[in-house]
Image (spheres, grey):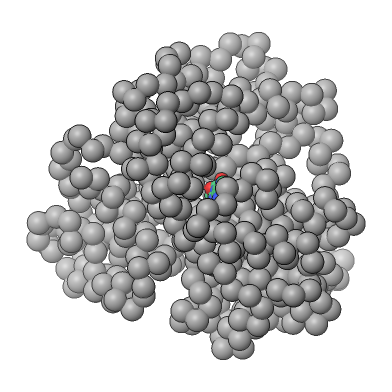
Amino acid sequence: MGYLEVENELYEKWDDILEKMKVNFDISDPAFNTFIKILKVHSISGKNLTILIDDAKIGSNKSFIEKRYSAFLQVTIEEMTNIKYDITYISKNEINTTPVETFKNTSLPSKDHPFISTKYTFDNFVVGDNNDYAHAASLKVAEEPGDIYNPLFIYGGAGLGKTHLMHAIGNYIIDRDNTQRVVYVTSESFVNEIVEAIRDKKGDGSNSMQEFRNKYRNVDVLLIDDIQFIIGKETMQQEFFHTFNHLYESQKQIVISSDKHPATMKTLEERLRSRFEMGLTVDIKPPTYETRMAILRRKVQEENLSIDDSILDFIASNVSSNIRELQGAITKVIAFSKLRHNDITMDLAKQALSDMIAPDKKKEITIDYIIETVADHFNISTNDLLSSKRSSNISHPRQICMYLCCELTNNTLDVIKKHLNRKDHSTIIHGRDNIKKLLEDTDANSKVAKDIDILIKKINPQ
Ligand SMILES: Nc1ncnc2c1ncn2[C@@H]1O[C@H](COP(=O)(O)OP(=O)(O)OP(=O)(O)O)[C@@H](O)[C@H]1O
């Protein structure tokens, strides 16, 4: 699903989500009316969801709401949308002072300006062997933007902290000088904005494309996340190339994140590749056990709880390759204990995480289970996965599904074909072989290799 579609879906379901949360967590009418009804979707950027506390008493309830209801809301949204968001709250008075607001007043609606989330700072970034170089480079860039490491290119697998570091850079720069125009955007939003600008010939004759260019070429710091989405899209690469040059020549800082090193981006235009490699390229690797434990301990501390180390060890040992999943796991355990009004014990943790971690259970691996797990992992619906849609965010997971059905089950191609709603079994062979080839052509740190690794663990955790 595209960025705007996901956002629309969340807007549409919002009232139902709040009602569901009320029922699930037994929230009283007065508490619901006072603290929950006032929550509105402000903006979405990837898996970062910002919620506006639309409260008459400006900002007064923010920390209470965050502490008391955040875990409940995250779990309910996940239940209703299959997406696990990182949630940030913003009160009305913050909206009126964030630098993003300045951009909001230029031309485009707020949802197109994902902004710097105050939730992600250097202070709450846990540094370990896997990310110390990326952390040090980011800090240097934040201290001296546009100076030595330009562009800074951060790459690594999903959920390992790239977005966190980008926001941390933004926060650090704004904290020191809030006149700095710092823009964070995912390349998916960047693409959507270009598409909208091209489509939209404004009624008053002014040119939306020009507005788009003015917006991105007049910033002091551009943080562009998940650049892989513009790869292979010629017009978009070209537009980004010109934006890049303009900023670079004016010594403005550019920070780019991606799931791959520029050298391994096959369809990246050569001139962009060489631009990306002009500055400093740093990677973030999957967290070591120590980093995972440190992240869990920090979360427990933030929640003012005390959880036995053996339980944290259980989580850290079983959720190893993605920090987003690690945080999701501990959040789920905490929400589960609040929901049941029970202390956090090993049994409760195992129960709460039984869908993620099930070391004691022998599970039969069925094609349908693989379909569900893959769809969930890529945040798409099973309907889309089984449809004939060809966009890469659907067709790639579908091919991964074909590969996994062939590798992990003993079903014939004919059976797999039927379950996956394909007409011809040669489609299954083609999909399976495509993924095999991708795995052969990339290293163990590539996005596809990591996705497969995580999926196999999810499907068959023994
Ligand atoms: N070193 C860390 N210390 C504390 N929290 C972390 C760290 N690394 C990641 N996180 C947290 O994990 C979650 C996922 O991180 P983030 O969104 O930055 O990942 P990403 O690499 O940008 O992933 P993707 O490629 O999927 O966008 C966030 O909530 C982030 O705060």
Total numbered circles: 0
Q: Give above or below for 168 relative to 53.
A: below
Residue sitting at 23 percent across and 59 percent down?
404
**Visible residue check, residue 326:** yes
Give the position of the C terminus as an image quadrant.
top left
**Visible residue check, residue 70:** no
Q: Position of residue 20 (x, y in %)?
A: 50, 24
Q: Give above or below for 276 relative to 335.
A: below
- Residue at the farthest right position: 179
> For residue 299, which quarter of the picture?
top right
Is 208 left, or right, of 285 in this rendering? right
> For residue 236, which quarter of the picture?
bottom right
Q: Position of residue 309 (x, y in %)?
A: 42, 30
> For residue 412, which quarter of the picture?
bottom left
Q: Give above or below for 237 relative to 211.
A: below
- Residue at the farthest bottom position: 270
Q: Position of residue 390 (x, y in %)?
A: 40, 67
Q: Position of residue 427 (x, y in %)?
A: 23, 70
Residue sitting at 86 percent across and 44 percent down?
97
Residue sitting at 81 percent across and 39 percent down?
94
Residue sitting at 80 percent across and 82 percent down?
249
Is 199 left, or right, of 133 in this rendering? right
